[in-house]
Amino acid sequence: MNNTKILWLTENYPPRRGGMAQACDRIVTSIRRKGIYIDVAFFNASAYTFKVTTQINGKLIAVPVSDSPAHNLNILFNYISDPSNKLTYTHIVSFGGNTPILALPIYKSWLKTKAITLLRGNDFDVGVFQATKREILFEALKSSDVVCALSQDVKNKIEALLPNLNVVHIPNGIDLEDWQQDSYDLEEAKKFRKINNISEDEILVGLFGQLKEKKGVVFFLENLLRTGLQENIQFLMVGDIEEQVQNWIKEHSTDETKLKVIQLPFLDRFELLTKYPACDYIALPSHYDGMPNVLLEAGALGIPVIAARTGGIYEVLPKEQLDLTFHPGNADQCRQALNKAASLSVLERKNLGLKLKEYIKNNFNIQKETQAYLDMFSLI
């Protein structure tokens, strides 16, 4: 493994915000800490110039994004192939986004490396159903020595379509030593509830991240109204809210409906430590999804989850949580889950959260995630 040198292509890396950028940073950093060399080529829409920064066990190569992916990839390859830079790689990784998937088969041939596609976010769910993207996606998958899926669900779907691929399942992990709430966070959470007039008898449900139609936000709120529980349940939305979702909320947040939605802008990860504990539940009603960081972050703090049984979400939840889940898009089951959530006592919610926290601690920690990636690289 000491001879392993990886070129890691991604559209998601800090300072870009969001769960995929966080996951990319976490995985790359944890693998580098094990002595593996990784150069991250980040196709950065905010970058003005091509820039290379030295990091521990690798470099960060910021590639400005133009209207032409071909231009971006040619510029990057010029740098990689420049003899004066003395760059050689054993593996190339595509991590999230169209440009890395487009580049993978060509770069693999030109650099004579092994190739790995790490499917994230919408790479598969959307790409497989868009004619313009499907051919590019399938070419990258077929060129890969290993395809890595976040969930067993996606692994099964890939193998059904392309049975000759080498597909592995590596779920997300979380660094539990790094991710902890303290007395300040809990006190700020109590203040937040008080400022927003949320009584102890009321339930606050959090929806965090990129809040768009794919995430099932409107579907979830519509079914909440149909249960008649809106006088007992309020919502906290933190993140970027899609215009379509925002318009629906404005239209339905009236004195007549009594729908109560508190909105906050996108917050950095550690800022959320004062918002997660304010919530009695976190909701993940996605129509389709991978394995959201929000799920592991909330669960690791002991907050129970109301969720759709889709992608990696369902695979993270212990059996005690199943009464709070529903098949994606199933309105009857969604309302049943909401009614169940509303019926639980404070103590019952706390016990559910503790079981979820323990399950994540044992099965989705960063140590297991890192070792799974090291094992994957060592086998090809």
Image (cartoon, rainbow, N blue to C red):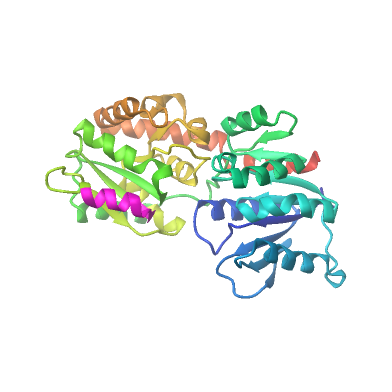
Asked if residue 242 lies in the magenta stretch, the reply is yes
Main SS of the magenta part reads helix
- The residue sitting at the bottom extreme is 49
Please provide percent x and percent y for residue 155: 63, 32
**Residue at 69% of width from left, 31% of height from top?**
162
The answer to which image quadrant residue 73 occupies is bottom right
Residue appearing at x 74%, y 65% in the figure: 74
Q: Position of residue 59 (x, y in %)?
A: 71, 65
Residue 103 or residue 342, whichever sits in front: 103
Q: Is 360 left or right of 87, judged from the image as shown? A: left
Residue 115 position, x and y percent, is 76, 46
In the image, farthest residue toward the left: 256
Work out whether residue 16 can be spotted: yes
Quarter placement of the C terminus: top right
Q: Which contiguous range is marked in magenta?
A: 238-251
Q: Is residue 82 above or below residue 18?
A: below
The total of numbered circles placed on residues is: 0
Horizontal side of 194 relative to 77 (left or right) equals left
Q: Is residue 186 visible?
A: no
